[in-house]
């Protein structure tokens, strides 16, 4: 049966009208969810691999682990330099020091005299774990889900598939259990090797646990995921104990002030034994019902959905106590609006939805449409990329300003630098005093010539600050009038202005005094040729960077030879101390000056430790080492500041590095997200964020209006296509009618 062309036209008209009236959106979220108190965040590539606090150490895991788990300490969200505060601990503990006979020492006792440090940490009472089936009990007080058979979990795929949940109070024993778990060979904790060197008896305990694990695995196939329970309540060691339900004691070997920063990491988050028993049951591991997928904690959020490589959801923990938002911050925080929620109970957001985005381009497009509240919650490079876009394009700058994007910047505990190898016969520090002085002047001359202000402007698009020393501004020890903020070897002070890099004439004079006038050996007349080792990378950007380095040295008449290496070869050169000049960077493990200055400590020399030390330049200076050995035992205070000043001054004079630059980091938030202060050290920022969902819904509607103008054109095109068919149909109908009349008798 033939279809009438007008009916076809009418049907197409109806279809266009339906499409036009409907809402067509590429939002990854359900319609209307933008009005809820939900934070929408993307994640890239894959789901987090480890959510077990003993093994989790990757950047992409922290948005989950630091919302669910609570170590005893945390960082004050706003104050800079970073300041530790009590988290589940009532307050920061004052460590007690003991000599080799177990007798008390004064707080200011020299570190060499301290045989043990005792940390007694008082916990806040009444803290509850989030609801979880591991705690569920029946009317008789027996655990509901601790004696399950494999068939009982056949239809269980997530924690919410278990009908009953329970909770209990956080106890000191939960921290004891967690620290013991660091030693298990089943988890492979990145913290164990370091902690085994410091916590009394932990190294030996690790050997005992490895033996116990081997005994339990006898007769169990290597591929079997159902392993017998390794119960850490059964074996302990002297370094960690619960003095009472709310007091935790940790004993350290010697004096290690930086241990307090470890107490703010999730390695030291509590793990309830009930969770271990629950997840160790038959059939659980096969369904990924483990701590790596379903963490159990006391933090502001709990994980309620885990769809691997697709979506994860954190929900407000109904048992969370509600800590108050801080009322103090760093200078300028009040003006930036960071103190407007002073004293209000946190968290502010009910739900966090993480959706996978496999490519960066659609991620950024959805962020600019308002569908994501931030393009990355755990990284600060996305905001920097947006700032670079604004510098490159007026259209982008106008768009981002019109959208009201918040792009707050900070200079974090992170640096990039050019290093000079102390073992090198040309640039190093050896030889007679006269030879050492000439080599020092050579390094100083090169440091002046390397114009890092220009580098930042060209290659970092202005998103960085030339460094005066190795210590970033966000750490204790950096002060505006101190050595960390001014390098007199490379810069000169100006009247009322910023320091100015010393002139090339001054650099050339130093070069001549070093024995290389005009870049040539004064004795042989041969040009000075230096080698730059770098990690090879493809692309025009890499070539341009290398050309820039060559030109910097050429300003002094010095020739720079580029020696490209793959990562393995580069590491080998650094481990053997055969590189002459190299480029590298460092991101702090914790916010302490020790974590930067240890890169110059003689015993940490990479070539002397088979590549295990972080003194990449193999710097050797007994005077510096003596200062470092005093400083590393000190808490922040005037004496520590004095020692830091002395060490940085020494490093500047010796020009161990051309200190490079501190990259700026930038967060990126929509205008309806508040309290988004950028940080790479603080890993639990989500609980401090606040949303205005009504504003979000309005802006998403404004920014994603349907485009109507193509519809009339489409209709005209349809009409143009159908009209000839309609005319042909009419002609055929007329011909058929005529034939019918002729054929009638």
Image: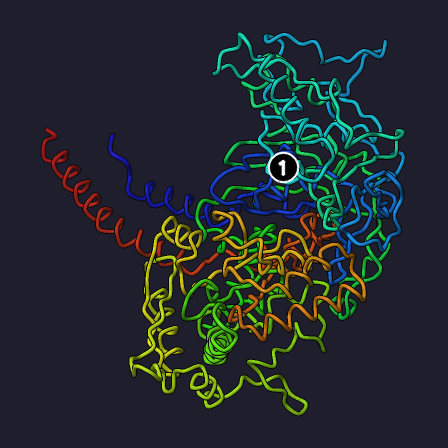
Give the left or right position of residue 724, taking residue 419 as reference.
Answer: left
For the rendered model, the colour scheme is rainbow
Residue displayed at 34% across by 41% down = 7
Q: Is residue 406 visible?
A: no
Vertically, is 615 above or below 16? Answer: below
Residue 456: where, in percent of width, then height?
A: 49, 73
In the image, residue 332 lies at what x, y percent?
75, 70
The structure residue drawn at horizontal position 69% and vertical position 48%, both measured from the top left corner, is 686
Given residues 646 and 745, the one toward you in this image is 646
Quadrant in which the N terminus appears: top left
Left or right: residue 352 versus residue 728 is right
298 is higher (above) or lower (below) than 589: above
Where residue 437 sits: x, y (%)? 51, 77
Which residue was labeled with disc 1? 313
Q: Is residue 393 above or below residue 608?
A: below
Residue 629 in view, yes or no? yes
Nearest to the observer: residue 503 or residue 335 = 503
Q: For the residue carrying disc 1, how many other residues have a C-alpha within 10 Å: few (<14), some (14-19), or many (20+)?
A: some
């Amino acid at each position: 049966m033939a279809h009438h062309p007008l009916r076809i036209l009418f049907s197409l008209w109806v279809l266009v009208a339906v499409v036009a009236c409907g809402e067509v959106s590429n939002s990854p979220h359900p319609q209307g969810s933008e009005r809820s108190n939900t934070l929408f965040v993307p994640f890239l590539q894959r789901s987090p691999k480890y959510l077990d606090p003993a093994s989790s150490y990757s950047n992409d895991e922290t948005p989950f682990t630091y919302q669910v788990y609570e170590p005893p300490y945390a960082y004050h969200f706003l104050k800079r330099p970073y300041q530790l505060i009590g988290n589940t601990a009532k307050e920061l503990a004052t460590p007690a020091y003991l000599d080799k006979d177990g007798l008390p020492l004064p707080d200011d006792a020299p570190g060499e005299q301290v045989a043990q440090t005792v940390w007694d940490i008082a916990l806040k009472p009444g803290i509850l774990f989030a609801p979880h089936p591991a705690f569920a009990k029946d009317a008789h007080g027996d655990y509901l889900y601790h004696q399950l058979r494999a068939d009982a979990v056949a239809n269980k795929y997530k924690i919410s598939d278990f009908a009953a949940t329970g909770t209990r109070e956080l106890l000191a024993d939960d921290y004891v259990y967690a620290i013991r778990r660091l030693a298990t060979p089943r988890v492979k904790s990145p913290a164990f090797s370091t902690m085994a060197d410091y916590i009394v008896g932990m190294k030996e305990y690790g050997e005992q646990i490895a033996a116990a694990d081997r005994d339990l695995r006898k007769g169990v196939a290597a591929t079997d995921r159902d392993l017998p329970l390794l119960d850490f309540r059964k074996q302990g060691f002297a370094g960690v104990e619960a003095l009472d339900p709310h007091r935790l004691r940790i004993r350290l070997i010697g004096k290690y002030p930086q241990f307090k920063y470890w107490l703010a990491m999730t390695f030291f988050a509590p793990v309830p034994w009930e969770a271990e028993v629950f997840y160790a049951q038959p059939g659980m591991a096969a369904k990924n019902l483990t701590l790596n997928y379903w963490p159990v904690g006391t933090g502001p959020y709990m994980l309620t959905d885990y769809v691997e490589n697709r979506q994860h959801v954190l929900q407000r923990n109904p048992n969370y106590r509600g800590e108050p938002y801080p009322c103090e911050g760093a200078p300028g925080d009040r003006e930036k609006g960071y103190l407007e929620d002073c004293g209000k109970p946190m968290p502010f957001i009910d739900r966090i939805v993480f959706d996978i985005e496999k490519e960066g381009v659609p991620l950024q497009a959805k962020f600019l449409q308002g569908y994501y509240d931030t393009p990355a919650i755990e990284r600060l490079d996305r905001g920097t990329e947006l700032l670079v876009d604004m510098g490159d394009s007026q259209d982008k700058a106008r768009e981002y300003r019109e959208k009201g994007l918040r792009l707050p910047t900070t200079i974090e505990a992170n640096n990039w630098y050019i290093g000079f190898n102390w073992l090198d016969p040309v640039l190093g520090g050896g030889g007679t005093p006269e030879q050492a002085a000439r080599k020092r002047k050579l390094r100083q001359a090169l440091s002046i010539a390397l114009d890092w202000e220009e580098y930042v402007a060209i290659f970092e698009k202005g998103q960085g600050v030339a460094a005066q020393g190795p210590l970033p501004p966000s750490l204790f020890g950096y002060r505006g009038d101190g050595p960390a903020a001014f390098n007199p070897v490379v810069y000169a002070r100006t009247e009322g202005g910023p320091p100015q890099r010393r002139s090339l004439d001054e650099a050339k004079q130093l070069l001549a005094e070093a024995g290389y006038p005009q870049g040539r050996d004064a004795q042989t007349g041969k040009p000075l040729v230096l080698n730059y080792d770098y990690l090879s990378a493809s692309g025009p950007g890499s070539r341009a960077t290398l050309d820039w380095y060559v030109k910097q040295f050429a300003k002094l008449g010095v020739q720079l030879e580029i020696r490209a290496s793959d990562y393995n070869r580069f590491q080998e050169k650094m481990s053997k101390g055969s590189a002459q000049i190299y480029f590298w960077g460092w991101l702090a493990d914790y916010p302490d000056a020790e974590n930067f200055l240890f890169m110059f400590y003689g015993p940490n020399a990479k070539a002397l430790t088979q590549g295990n030390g972080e003194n990449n330049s193999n710097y050797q200076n007994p005077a510096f080492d003596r200062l470092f050995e005093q400083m590393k035992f000190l808490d922040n205070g005037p004496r520590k500041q004095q020692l830091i000043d002395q060490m940085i001054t020494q490093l500047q004079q010796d020009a161990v590095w051309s200190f490079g630059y501190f990259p700026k980091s930038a967060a990126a938030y929509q205008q309806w997200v508040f309290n988004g202060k950028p940080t790479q050290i603080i890993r639990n920022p989500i609980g401090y964020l606040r949303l205005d969902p009504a504003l979000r819904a309005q802006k998403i509607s404004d920014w994603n209006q349907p485009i109507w103008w193509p519809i009339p054109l489409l209709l005209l095109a349809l009409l143009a296509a159908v009209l000839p068919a309609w005319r042909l149909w009419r002609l055929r109908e007329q011909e058929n009618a005529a034939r019918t009349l002729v054929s009638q008798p």
